[in-house]
């Protein structure tokens, strides 16, 4: 029974949405297992172009069941808005289930996130401002509200009474913000619970039943491994574990059940927000990679910020592959490199007079490393119409093969355009 985890292998926005969209056609169950509406997954299909922030990207296929797992943090207003906008575009959400164990992003989390960023000043993280960090912090501090709580008047009221007392002290004394009315928050969140009641449930029996049958299960990653709370470029990270371990935990599936872990890499690298980025490029090189003016331009899906871009970093790529046990790679946006005469890959770092093949944990040191590049010839031919590996220009084949060699995994799919069919599948995982 195939259980495939699709994981962002860089700093997010690798094109996970399009990979999930492709694999979901062959799956029965799709589970978003972590993060929240900091994510933005672009999907281009027969219904149009969609930017999914919270809902699983499998919803477009009527034969699938879609789950928001316990590891996700949920802003109910965003969930409702996304449900509404899908319905308006004739996409059914009847097969959507939300874990009653998933934590709720509350209004104070959003205030905390945005004010914390202001207080950090120059050393801001560049968060999406959606309350993600504070919601995960409260979960760990055991003062979180869970989706299941929204379904029970008594539980919600007593939970809110306890938590708002703490939060209002924090809001008024530390943040200099207005306190929140218990009555108003209670009524608003009770109403969210009522509106989402058909979706909120114990999802574990659904997941475990699917595992017992021979159906395809797809674990939809959000963010990327280099934003991982433990292994990313801390503190310039998100507050969850976006990798394969997070997939097991957030979906409630034992790691021995995984049949494949697919690492999604862009053919170059992008990053939104602050933090070290050794292979970052600027000026004309950056413009070439950003492809501004195209529908797939490097502009943040969630916040509209211009993404920082750079050359493929094989040191980081191998690091994330090892952390997650990637057996198969998805390489997206190969077509974006079509015009370049030469393409660089970072194969090591130089720090003073030593060479490193791992990123240092400390970001001050990491900020000082110099990439060691290898240069490959470009192909300077369009690839968007290619549908088989052999149809790619030899230099493009060589580029993909070199990445696989450096990362240590086989190629699964290669993206050569934004549309659903603009993909080359070399090895199947599902
Ligand atoms: P995600 O968050 O990992 O799902 O990625 P995003 O949706 O935030 O960003 C990826 C962008 O690249 C989107 O605009 C996708 O439509 C686009 N994209 C994905 N794969 C390809 C590809 O192979 N070629 C091109 N040109 N665009 C792609
Ligand atoms: P998808 O799923 C790119 C980044 C933010 C910021 C850092 C912390 O579309 O790949 P947070 O709001 O999570 O506390 O912000 O993480 N970030 C992302 N960058 N894609 C994402 O999601 C991201 N989710 C968070 O820009 O640097
Ligand atoms: Mg994205």
Image (tube, rainbow, N blue to C red):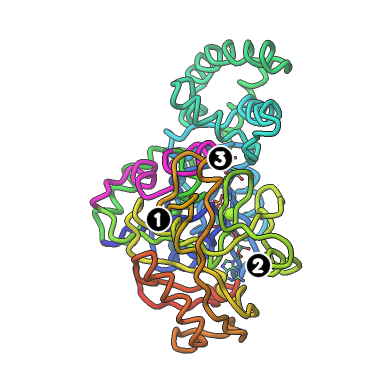
* Disc 3 CB within 8 Å of nearest ligand 2 atom: yes
What residue would you read off at disc 1?
Answer: 357
Image location of residue 95, percent across then percent down: 47, 52
Quarter of the image with the C terminus in it: bottom left
The secondary structure type at the circle numbered 1 is: loop
Per the rendered image, the range of residues in magenta is: 230-256
User: What residue is at 71 percent from the left and 29 percent from the top?
Assistant: 118
Q: Main secondary structure of the magenta part?
A: loop
Instruction: Identify whether 404 is placed above or below 233.
Output: below
What residue would you read off at disc 2?
Answer: 289
What residue would you read off at disc 3?
Answer: 236
Mark 3 neighbour density, 10 Å: few (under 14) some (14–19) many (20 or more): many
Is residue 270 left or right of 222 when viewed as pictured? right
Mark 1 neighbour density, 10 Å: few (under 14) some (14–19) many (20 or more): some
**Alpha carbon of mark 1 to alpha carbon of mark 3: how far?**
21 Å
Mark 2 neighbour density, 10 Å: few (under 14) some (14–19) many (20 or more): many
Q: Are marks 1 and 2 in contact (CB under 8 Å)?
A: no
User: Does the magenta segment cover residue 151?
Assistant: no
Image location of residue 206, percent across then percent down: 34, 47
Instruction: Identify whether 68 is placed above or below 284.
Output: above
Tell which circle, 3 or 2, labels the residue nearer the N-terminal end.
3
Is residue 73 left or right of 107 when viewed as pictured? left
Quarter of the image holding residue 165? Answer: top right
Residue closest to the far right: 293
């Amino acid at each position: 029974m195939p259980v495939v985890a699709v994981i962002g292998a860089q700093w997010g926005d690798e094109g996970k949405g399009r990979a999930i969209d492709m694999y979901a056609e062959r799956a029965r169950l799709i589970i978003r297992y972590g993060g929240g509406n900091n994510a933005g997954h672009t999907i281009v299909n027969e219904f149009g172009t969609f930017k999914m922030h919270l809902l699983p990207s499998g919803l477009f296929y009527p034969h699938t069941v879609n789950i928001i797992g316990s590891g996700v943090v949920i802003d109910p207003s965003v969930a409702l808005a996304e449900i509404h906008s899908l319905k308006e575009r004739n996409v059914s959400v009847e097969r959507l289930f939300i874990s009653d164990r998933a934590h709720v992003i509350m209004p104070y989390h959003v205030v905390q996130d945005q004010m914390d960023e202001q207080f950090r000043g120059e050393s801001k993280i560049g968060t999406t401002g959606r309350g993600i960090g504070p919601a995960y912090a409260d979960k760990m501090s055991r003062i979180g509200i869970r989706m299941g709580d929204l379904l029970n008047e008594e539980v919600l009221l007593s939970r809110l009474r306890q938590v708002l007392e703490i939060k209002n002290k924090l809001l008024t004394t530390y943040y200099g913000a207005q306190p929140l009315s218990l009555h108003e928050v209670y009524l608003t969140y009770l109403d969210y619970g009522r509106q989402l009641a058909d979706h909120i449930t114990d999802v574990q029996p659904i997941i475990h039943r699917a595992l017992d049958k021979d159906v395809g299960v797809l674990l939809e990653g959000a963010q990327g491994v280099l934003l991982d709370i433990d292994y990313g470029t801390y503190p310039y990270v998100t507050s969850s574990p976006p990798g394969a371990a997070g997939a097991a935990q957030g979906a409630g599936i034992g790691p021995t059940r995984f049949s494949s872990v697919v690492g999604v890499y862009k053919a170059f690298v992008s990053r939104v927000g602050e933090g070290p980025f050794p292979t970052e490029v600027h000026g004309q090189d950056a413009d070439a990679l950003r492809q501004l003016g195209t529908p797939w331009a490097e502009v943040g899906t969630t916040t509209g910020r211009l993404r920082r871009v750079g050359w493929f970093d094989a040191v980081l790529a191998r690091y994330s592959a090892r952390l997650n046990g990637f057996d198969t790679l998805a390489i997206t946006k190969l077509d974006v490199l079509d015009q370049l005469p030469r393409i660089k890959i970072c194969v090591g770092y130089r720090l003073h007079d030593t060479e490193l093949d791992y990123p240092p944990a400390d970001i001050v040191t990491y900020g000082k490393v110099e990439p060691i590049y290898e240069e490959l010839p470009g192909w300077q031919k369009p690839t968007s119409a290619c549908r088989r590996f052999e149809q790619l220009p030899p230099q493009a084949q060589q580029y993909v093969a070199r990445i696989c060699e450096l990362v240590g995994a086989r190629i699964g799919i290669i993206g050569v355009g934004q549309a659903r069919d603009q993909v080359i599948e070399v090895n199947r995982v599902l």
